[in-house]
Amino acid sequence: MYVAINILGLVVFLAIGFLFSKKKKEINWKSIAIMVVINLFLAWFFTSFSVGRDAVKAAADGFNWLVQVAYQGIVFALPNWVTPDFGGTAKSLNFITSALLPILMIVPMFDILTYIGFLPWVIKWIGRGLSFITGQPKFESFFAVEMMFLGNTEVLAISGIQLRQMNAQRNLTLAMMSMSCVTASILGAYTQMVPGQFVLTAVPINIINSIIVTSMLNPVKVPEEEDTIAKVGSEGQDADGKREPFFSFLGDSILGAGKLILIIVANVIAFVALAALIDKILGAFWKPLSLESILGVIMFPFAWLMGLPVDQAWTLSQDMGLKLVTNEFVVMGKVAGGVINGYDPHLRAILTVFLTSFANFGTIGMIIGAFKGLVNKEKNELIAKNVGYLLLSGILVSLLSAGFVGLFVW
């Protein structure tokens, strides 16, 4: 019976995507069906064989190495912000150090690769292959892979030239995708708190689900002539039409990355503080009342649709609500060790996969802040008007990923 409920849950989650679609008639159902089959295969493969998880871990380790290189510059300027593992003296990494300061190295590096034409070439061919499989535009397909390892702010930052050349609707699609990312540098921390097998399983499945969900909620038809990969062109030329000198281009890239970090920090602080203010106001009326508790109740039907008994569904829904208001680390810390190991295998797998993403209120602030520093007012306003869609996208991706994996773990 519970397997049937799990299957029903997947149908319901896809139906919600259709229900809230901005353009129901433009949904490419053939593409959706292909990607659902791919994710069923991936869920089976990653839960049954270790070779796939080893491949994901190798890719994650490569991106993690890149972030660790960035810490060398941070240690030189701010040694007391970095832990001894990376050459500093701090007891722990703060949010700015772990999630934002690596942008100062990563963005210029990727901009250099764009300047010399290498990154557009990579995106073109990898994107073409993924586009052929998924039926989605080349850049969106490649972006889904990038964001799963680099994180939302980093991958948006290195995509600035592309974002400015794309229309507002495609920018909205990328903003919605960004709700479901992770960062390779913290996958290791995840695996210390919750079962690593399911953390690494969630990464590739989230990639496909982010494309499924956004192509349902915000289907955008991209003509072939617009399905191109941006190169350094008008933004990298001087008044005479010549390419901007390399070091001038590099300086602009570094300054742009610094400005972006300041904007993101301001937005994250404001969003988290406002959420805390709402909790205080709700608590004044009734002490147990909070955003987490409200979302925990709202998420209960969806938790039950994962194929769980009522008591386990309630446990899962409370953790879901807490994760959406705070972040995945708070919940992982709560259930780490003996708690999650004492859960039934099905609940353990579902909870771990649901937690393996950045989908929460704070991430909305990061994404809005990133776009404010990268694109024009028109595109910013469209994203700001669709904050609800950003959150819905992140939740649906997490639900679908957990539901797919849950089918194969009992």
Image: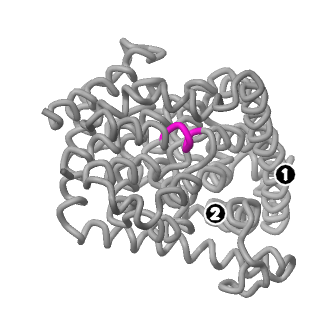
Residue highlighted by disc 2: 110
| Rendered position, 229 above or below 9 | below
Q: Secondary structure at mark 1?
A: helix
Residue highlighted by disc 1: 262
Q: Amino acid at mark 2?
A: Phe
Q: Is residue 136 visible?
A: no
What separation in Å lies between label 1 and label 2 (alpha carbons)? 20 Å
Q: Quadrant of residue 306?
A: top left
* Residue numbers of the magenta segment: 320-324
Q: Quadrant of residue 14?
A: top left
Rendering coords of residue 173 (x, y %): 53, 32
Q: Give the camera-side residue of 74 and 394.
A: 394
Q: Amino acid at mark 1?
A: Leu
Residue with the most extreme left position = 1
Residue positioned 62% across, 23% down in the render? 386
Q: Quadrant of residue 340?
A: bottom left
Residue positioned 62% across, 60% down in the render? 114
